Amino acid sequence: MIEVKEALEIVAANSSNMPKQKIQVRKALGYVLAETIYSPIAMPPFRQSAMDGYAFIHSGRHQFDIVGISQAGDHVKVKLKENEAVRIFTGAHVPKNADTVVMQEDVMANENSILIAKMPEPFSNVRNKGEQINEEDVVFDANTVITPAAIGFLACLGITEIQVYKKPKVAILVTGNELVEPGKKLKKGKIYESNSIMLQATLQTIGIKNAKVFRVKDSLKETKNALKDLLKKNDIVLISGGISVGDYDFVKEALLENGVQELFYKINQKPGKPMFFGSKKNTLVFALPGNPASSLTNFYIYVYPAVKNLMGFSNTHLPKIVRKLNDDIKNTTGKTLFLKALYDETSVAILDGQASSMLNSFAIANGLVIVEHNCEKMQAGELVTILPID
Amino acid sequence: MIEVKEALEIVAANSSNMPKQKIQVRKALGYVLAETIYSPIAMPPFRQSAMDGYAFIHSGRHQFDIVGISQAGDHVKVKLKENEAVRIFTGAHVPKNADTVVMQEDVMANENSILIAKMPEPFSNVRNKGEQINEEDVVFDANTVITPAAIGFLACLGITEIQVYKKPKVAILVTGNELVEPGKKLKKGKIYESNSIMLQATLQTIGIKNAKVFRVKDSLKETKNALKDLLKKNDIVLISGGISVGDYDFVKEALLENGVQELFYKINQKPGKPMFFGSKKNTLVFALPGNPASSLTNFYIYVYPAVKNLMGFSNTHLPKIVRKLNDDIKNTTGKTLFLKALYDETSVAILDGQASSMLNSFAIANGLVIVEHNCEKMQAGELVTILPID
């Protein structure tokens, strides 16, 4: 049995970046860049007006003849004289030798000429070529996360394809004779199987949308055969249940017989103690506890950072935050506790229903309060560390 | 022109809940419940062992004959005598008159009998029927957000379908003669169109995955015709560009001629001033500024809470947080400023590149710092309000 800290280190050390892939920018939300991006163009690509108004050569003169018009999308070739101006609109090309744009609100105009009532400073309202970025400049460094704004910026530079880290392919293997699919009739002694769709949903929240679910009975042979195939075809195999020390828990044996290297088994924590982590070639195996709340806790603590690592994120852990405790906490277990909690901007309340089988409190929690194994007591008012899970 | 606060109130007052729909629990992540859910079963549905061990009648006796076995999924019918115990596993049915389970680590066992070395308290390690929830009890109130844990809890109660508020159908209409699709060659005077895929990506982050994009040239007739159809078929129409006062901005006219009621036009803010908000029947129309950073700012400030309202969320605004300013801020504009910023657990830094055309800073920002229109100056060290956008 190892401590949480050590378990986290082992997971981190064994989860390296996925291979790279080309992807369309429009589909890249939530991926991480695997290359440095350089701009193919200057932005703006030409001198642009920042206003609807008139472009002219700033000289002290107030009156101008209108000799042309520049709409957004146009490229006007007119060469202005000192007494000439061009009607211009936001985003439109500023004629070659014009240096200033006056906004239309500051002008009196008739069909053929204007009088500037309020003279702008020289060079006003002109966005210079490359003001935002120049050709060949760095747009984003490798390891930048692709946000909506990043997609917008790439698109406005005309970039349609980028290289990112692949997302891992994840399979979920569910074990247990007691499990019945929701929607079917529940016979005596059976319970509904809920971990698989809960884990699928949790994976969705971090961008893994197509995790497939497989089911086996509590049988060494069946478990072993299922794993053989899953280990070949996936980057991560999540197993639900069958990993405690009961006589009918075959998962560990089935893993070892399939050549999976054990990296740790059992962690000094509550809930979530019976967990196995191992690897075979590039495939990571997390055998999670069968109890729903334990399973979800360990997903957030161990699987989440591993998936993030694989996807190339540099902050792979859930961000930790600190809040004032509303309640006293006792920890007589000698284990690290992860307590379902509800926090706001200033404080955090520990929720009722912390048992490993209970999901009620998890469904309304927005964080897990961490109580270290060697911390026996925390008092209301003390600062405590929280993993946000919302 | 109205103030930000008033604009927000008008958006809120005009965005009510979408109609309800039945949905499979497995597809319900991120939806909001439109009904109160009652449990169809007790959970646990029967008395369960919380440990691998032995079930017996607590009487002071330490030695027991093993008369049966209860695995997870079994329903044992044995009636224990005082000197009898049953081998039992985690999650398995506890025989009718057994009251206590001793964990296997505290027992010396041979094939036929056990000796309890460390006697547990009476009723230890037995999860009572309905300990988590009883039949007919409330599982979730209406307006609960469906999280992964909520999906898990619903599934473990055997619930496969729930009633939620529909997600709005959103269309994006892009206007502008100057716009070229990324990937094509950029002619002089043109720029790449990036707002549509940026808005699509932003919608994705709040669960709207299928927003369709339509494009028109700067022509009143074309804009009007496109809008006519879009207003009929969507719950929200987002329009990009064409809404400032330039002679070639036809959007407002096209909206009014289509019977859209103006709810406000222009907001006293920077960036994002030229924005139109209106409605026709149940369809909301947001005509966003064409400048990318203004467009995205107004999406987060106005469209985001409207979408959340429609989806039934009760906290419809981005959560606001408060941090210490790293920099002085001057506001000589008399407008409410939304500044791209990067915050951590304690402080916030204002980013370079705040111009409305610039997306660079947005791509690395994780929040927008709000400076009220009537606030002329804020000093480093002061507390400031931030809308997180990560």
Image (spheres, coloured by chain):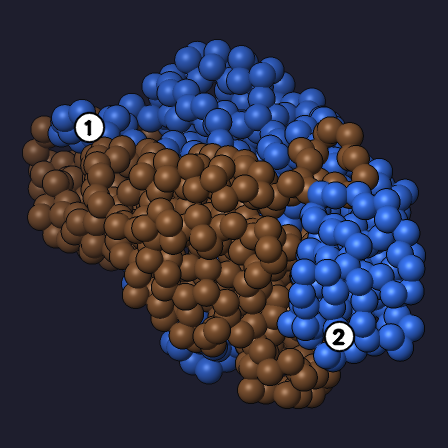
Chain colours: A blue, B brown
Q: In this view, does B230 lie to the left or right of A74?
A: left
- Residue drawn 9% across the image and 28% down it: B77
Name the spot of residue B363 as percent of width and height, x first: 68, 53
| Mark 2–mark 1 distance (CA, rounded to whole Å) | 75 Å
Q: Nearer the viewer, mark 2 or mark 1?
A: 2
Which badge, 2 or 1, is on the more N-terminal residue?
2
* Crowd around label 2: few <14 · some 14–19 · many ≥20 (10 Å): some
In screen coordinates, is B35 left or right of B339?
A: left
- Label placed on residue A116: 2
| Front-most of residues B118 and B274 | B274
Relative to A51, say whether B36 is above or below.
above
Chain ID of residue with mark 1: A
At label 1, counting other C-alpha atoms closer than 10 Å, the crowd grade (few under 14, some 14-19, many 20 or more) is few
* Kind of residue at badge 1: Gly
Q: Answer yes or no: is residue B250 visible.
A: yes
Name the residue carrying label 1. A183
Residue ID at (74%, 68%): A114
